[in-house]
Image (cartoon, rainbow, N blue to C red):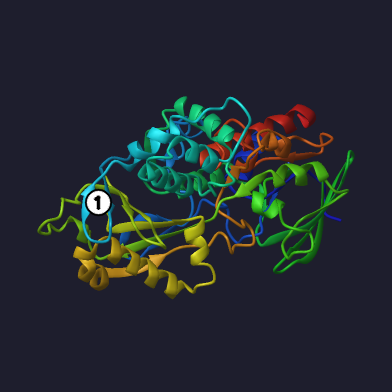
Amino acid sequence: MPAQDDVLIIGAGVAGLAAAAELHEAGIRVRLLEARDRIGGRAWSIDAEGLEQAIELGAEFIHGMPPELFSIAQAAHLDPIELGGENFASDGKSVKRFDFFQKSESVLNELDGRGPDRPFMEFVHEHVKKDPEKLQWATRYVRGFHAADPELISVHAMVRESRAEGKIEGDRQFRPAHGYRTLVEWYQRRLAGVAIDLNSRVRSIQWSRSGVEVLSFGARSGRLYRQAKKLLVTLPLGVLQADVSENDAVEFVPDLPQKRKAASRLAMGRVLRITLHFRERFWAIPKPGMPSLTQMRFLMADDEYFPTWWSVYPVEAPLLVGWAPDIYADKLRGKTHDQVVAQARASLEHALPQYAREIRERLVAGYFHDWQEDPFSRGAYSYVKVGGLGAQEALGAPVENTLFFAGEATEAEGHHATVHGAIATGLRAAREILAVVG
């Protein structure tokens, strides 16, 4: 049996890395078990040949000015770039300037946390009966921003999230200049000397007040047992929701019915996002009858696959990102890489028919990762279902001062589904652990 660690951490995503760094620097013996062959979890930056800008396969934005990120921005070399530019909408024939955020916010600002909780769709039908355009944009906003089913997402949770965003200037958006890789690399430097077992798939966790024993499988090591005094679980919600009979699911022995109940009151949003790399910023080429797209930020399109596009402006890189949330992502399920790239190209041609030739001739490559099909995430990020307030607190609560939980789905103040929310839960879990072992 290997030497016992003070704390085992399952998952080397941002929450796990944040907790590990705090515990390690406090003198705690930490070991991370990560199923993937890399650290970072749903923060994953890659390079593309001939391109200086990092391509994000997962998290991309900094929402507002959260202290969890801005307090470390200099040390982690985040160099946040604030987004600007103009927003446009396309009906498949013409493109016009259009402030769709204002359209959707005219409905969202009426959200009320008083009274019984209800699904967003019920609320919006009541408030915009005579304005189908408002209904369309509000629904598209919820699907797009929350990656949520409007029939399931909680109005009370959306109100709490709106209030939380207001405290950090959530209407401002930033992007790490060099991608989220700099954050992951910063944590990696802080974890020098800490054991990080990659390709380590945890299958079962036997626990008691006296400690834990974790069974994992590695590509080279095979079956391996590890013991520790405490365990921090940072698995994504989709993995926690998986039935133990499924491959790559994790079994707790004894079982944790309270955690399963809490997880059932939350949902994992579905998104497929793709980055298209072009030889140049073709949309900056003037076209007769077209508004100037040189400073295009977002483009909303009437498309059944990719209804949302954005550039990386004010960085002038030849990249456009297509966003297929919720029901749109479902339509792309099971398609090959080439099929998804071809569909994204076709959708962009539909949104910008005036540039169809440039899109076909100047496309270099498409990059995406299907987080729904990834067995170690099983979705993009979490949201709260109707009646689910309190589930995040329950999911994140320690068990017998032995099992601890972190990850964006355990963030209970309205910052779930964000990188800074994940960091906050990792720091919270580290404090909880230090209170009983420090």
> Mark 1 highlights which residue?
316
In this view, the residue farthest toward the left is 288
The answer to whether residue 142 is above or below residue 280 is: above
The answer to whether residue 4 is above or below residue 428 is: below
Q: Kindly tell me whether residue 79 is visible in this rendering.
A: no
Q: Out of 43 and 295, give the one closest to the viewer.
A: 295
Q: In what quadrant of the picture does the N terminus appear?
A: bottom right
- Residue type marked 1: Glu
**Judging from the image, what secondary structure is the residue with disc 1 in?**
loop
Q: Kindly tell me whether residue 238 is visible in this rendering.
A: yes
Q: Out of 57 and 372, give the one closest to the viewer.
A: 372
293 sits to left or right of 272: left
Task: Please identify the quarter of the rendering in which residue 154 is found.
Answer: top right
Residue 70, percent from left and from top? 45, 32
In this view, the residue farthest toward the front is 130
Residue 287, percent from left and from top? 12, 59
Q: Out of 239 and 188, give the one closest to the viewer.
A: 239
What's the residue at 25%, 68% (across, down)?
A: 359
Residue 284, percent from left and from top? 18, 55
Residue 140, percent from left and from top? 43, 48
Q: In what quadrant of the picture does the C terminus appear?
A: top right
The answer to whether residue 87 is above or below residue 172 is: below
What's the residue at 76%, 47% (across, down)?
A: 260
Q: Count how many numbered circles sit on residues in the image.
A: 1
